[in-house]
Image: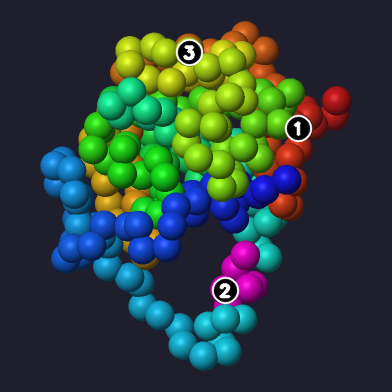
Amino acid sequence: MASPWSNATIDGAPGAGLEAAAPAPGQARPAAPGAPSAAAPEAHDGRGGAELARQFRHAMRRLTAAVSIVATREHGARYGMAATALSTLCTEPPAIVVCINRNASVYLPLARTRRFSVNLLQARQADLIAPFSGKLEHAARFAFGAWREARGLPVLGGAQATLLCRVDAMYGYGSHDLVIGRVEAVTAAESVTPLLWQNGAPAAASALGA
């Protein structure tokens, strides 16, 4: 099973990112399609840099995160990816931040349409991780799961919760963009049974003392 940590936001062909001047650190991307690619962070050359990267990946396997599918639609085609790098940003206004690799197949359609859905997976939906993390063409991914459309966006039936979002800003850093999504609509299940990703594998949550 493919890992959303390693592949979910890196499913596009090399070099598929946008090619233009980088914004200054912390500068928001312009709203127009074709936003500039980000400035790369300071590189660590040589074996020391490779070892630091290995240690970082090893450490981040200890960070348990909920698994979601970020999806959008452009010209009738649907695009989606599994993601764990997603967080609440604020509640006034309701907003989230999701990190997306610029080589991900969902990146350019999302950047152009400025709209996307976030579908938080239930523990029983672990079988959706692989198709939305690997090399399947964007249309083939949606053969997995009960997908429908809401406000012009792909929405997953049976999800733990679904957020419909509009892009407010995109900030570049290294290979990724931090996408700020203003939440426009929310649905949520009564039960709380999120699908988690822990130490490179799916996991389920349990209450302490249970």
Q: Mark number for residue 53?
A: 2
Q: Relative to the observer, which residue lies in front, 6 or 89?
A: 6
Secondary structure of the residue carrying tag 1 is strand
Label 2 – label 1 distance at C-alpha? 28 Å
Does the CB distance between marks 2 and 1 fall below 8 Å? no
Q: Earlier in the sequence, mark 2 or mark 1?
A: 2
Q: Which badge, 3 or 2, comes first in the chain's sequence? A: 2
**Do the numbered discs 3 and 2 sit on residues whose CB atoms are within 8 Å?**
no
Residue 140 vs 152, above or below: the answer is: below
Kind of residue at disc 3: Arg
Residue projecting furthest to the bottom: 46
Identity of the residue furthest to the right in this view: 210
Which tag is nearer the camera, tag 3 or tag 2?
Answer: 3
Residue 20 picture location, percent across and down? 18, 63
Is the N terminus in the top left, top right, bottom left or bottom right quadrant? Answer: top right
Q: Quadrant of the C terminus?
A: top right
The answer to whether 201 is drawn above or below residue 68 in the figure is: below
Q: Quadrant of residue 168?
A: top left
Q: Which residues are magenta?
A: 52-57
